[in-house]
Amino acid sequence: MNEKTSWRADLLGAGAAGTLVLAFCGLLLWHNPLLFWNDDYEISILPVFADVARSWSQGQIPLLSPYSWVCGNLAGEFQYGTFSLFVNAAVVLIWKFPLAFAQQAAALSLAHLFVLAAGAFLLARGRNLSSPLATMVALVAALNGWIICWGATDWFGALGAFAWLPWAWWGMERALDKSRTKFRFLWPAPFVYLLVTGGFPYTVLMLALLALWLAVKSLGEARPLASLWPLALGLGLGGGLSAPAWLALFDYVHGSARAAQENPGAHWQWLVPPAALPGLIWPPWTVPWTDFWTRPVPHAAIELACGTVPPLALGAALVFLRGRFVRRMKWELGLLVLVLLIAVLPSANVFRWSFRWLPLFHLVLGLLAAEALAQFRLTNGWRWLLVFVVFGSLLATYLVLPTHPAVPRYHFASSLTNPQPLDPARLYLSAYPPPETAYRIENHPRPVGQVTRPGSTSVWAGLHFVNGYSPIGGAGVGRAFAFSTHGEIDPGTADYLLGYEAGRDGLLALLGVDGIVVARESAAAPQPATEWTLAHEEEEGRIYHRVGGPLPRVRSVASLPSSPNEKLARATIGLRADSRQEIIAEVEVPAGEDPALIVFSRPYFDGYRATVNGRKIAVDSYRGLVPVIKLPPGTQGRLVVIYRPWWLLVGGAIAAASLLVFLSALGMAAFFGAVRPAQ
């Protein structure tokens, strides 16, 4: 078979492997249409992606969202893949169709599972494994227990990034292949970019570990240090292309609640117990695992499900092939042990839940099993039989065992895309109990959220809420108001704000909060009563509106709670535009001695820049909560405030330069006919 024919056959094989994974998921969806509709997907991922689609339809880049203050910085949250062309294209396309929530989630996950399976197939074929064995690797990589029970059905960012890890691995091995041309450094770059922008820091660590492992392996095989330059250049180009994403994350995490890591016990949660390892062969194997509350609870080892065949094949090779197999696969065996140790040991720093390394463990295990079966010299007929054993074993596992045993599911109805009974012109603060206990379907089987809008569900209907889902906790208001990850405000803080800061001159008025939602579990009400009116009441909770109509989004204030004696003039403001990243207003400050203070009712993030009639003016914040600008007496003209953070400017320049280098090298390679597909 010539090179061109082999390349075409591999692409067709990759497509077939991806299609087989889609067929597998189709069977699971036939059994359970809500398979991909759980926890974070419901309360965070899907509503935000609805806003991403809305943003692109409005012709705006979804850097910020106006509909949640806690989750207002989409780029900084990282998990939403703001700078991933693939994630954004998938979201825009899927939201063109009239799909239900669960169907949108399924479509998004299936698109990435297809990519993951195809990449794993090509990675295996690049190691000269037969098509049946490469298909087995694809099934193990895309359908293992961790991917199905967590990445594809809950933590989408994990799947969005890991889908590209086999591709990046494949590209890095090509970059180190000295039989290829000098342009071989191009192979890993686009996949590194897609992996990093996919939105999961753990997968970036996996990529770094793989790159280091490949470099050490290359040097260990007596290759010179200079032979690593294509790998280093390819990784550098990929990192450059993704610079806005990782720079945004670094900037946002700094000083965040996640960086403070207020719960050291989280490092001991969701480790892989060594006693659970028989679950690689028998997923119902149940031993205590440490859960989100740092409690040892009996848990079936469904995360270790890998189709039964891979661990048996590896064990058979170690027993029967012994030294011959170990000598040939010593590097991969070392990598497997290293990744397993990471998954078993406590995490560190801002990272937590070490079992998140299991997808890489499964991928390495699949490759080792395929190499073992190749050395046993089975016929292709037997190899295909083993593929169907893996397929059947995984299918039986997910049909028998629950695929979401440790996370809640909520009954969010399609009516959440409707803003009623809330007012889209108002900014709400919602006081509700922890959703993962109060609103999970076992405790609240009826539809929930139409009033309280837990997490980021307000984004579906374009409602403005202070609340939102943020695992990072980077927004100043999120830290100041002690919001939890799922968007619920600390009860003591809520009582204080409603009792002492809800008046006309209180903090909530300064922020622009003119609506309060109180869940039925609480008897609290905003004070003073003369400032608020009960606008709606039902079983789920009560809605209060500030008397006098919605507050302006851009206001001139006479004083600040922190400095009530400071003299401030009242400016006249004519708002012209208030979009995601830009505010335009005509302002006029009375002549005299007193400046005017302009407050913008939106969460403060470092990076706002302002001009008046083209002249730069400083943007400050009030206690890190909202942007404020002080204008000198007599100021008149057009005020323009735009969100343009340093990381976007620097990251954009790095990405543009990297893209120019990549395209130039690609053009040269094409011109000289130097990029050749592998045989």
Image (tube, grey):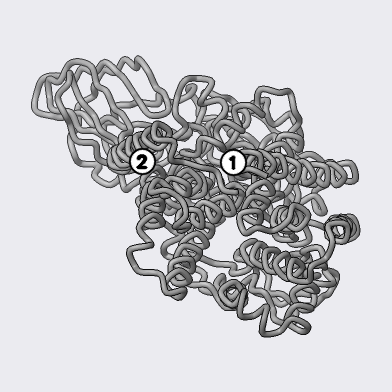
Q: Looking at the picture, does residue 557 appear above or below residue 129?
A: above
Q: Nearer the viewer, residue 381 or 475?
A: 381
Q: Secondary structure at mark 1?
A: loop
Could you tell whether 598 is left or right of 458 in the image? left
**How many numbered discs?**
2
Could you tell whether 384 is left or right of 421 in the image? right
- Tell me the amino acid under the disc marked 1: Ser
Q: Is residue 488 in view?
A: no
Q: Determine the residue positioned at 51% across, 73% down.
A: 264
| Among the 4 quarters of the image, the one containing residue 371 | bottom right
Q: Looking at the picture, does residue 200 appear above or below residue 265?
A: above
Q: Position of residue 435 (x, y in %)?
A: 68, 51
| Among the 4 quarters of the image, the one containing residue 309 | bottom right
Could you tell whether 553 is left or right of 279 in the image? left
Callout 1 crowding tier (Cα within 10 Å): few <14, some 14–19, many ≥20: many
Q: Nearer the viewer, residue 284 or 322?
A: 322
Q: Which residue is mark 2?
A: 604
Q: Is residue 1 in view?
A: yes
Q: Position of residue 626 (x, y in %)?
A: 35, 39
Q: Position of residue 389 (x, y in %)?
A: 88, 60
- Tell me the amino acid under the disc marked 2: Tyr
Is the residue under label 1 in contact with that under label 2 (CB below 8 Å)? no
Q: Nearer the viewer, residue 587 or 295?
A: 295
Q: Which mark is residue 456?
A: 1
Q: Determine the residue positioned at 75% across, 60% down.
A: 145
Q: Secondary structure at mark 2?
A: loop
Q: Determine the residue positioned at 41% across, 56% down.
A: 231
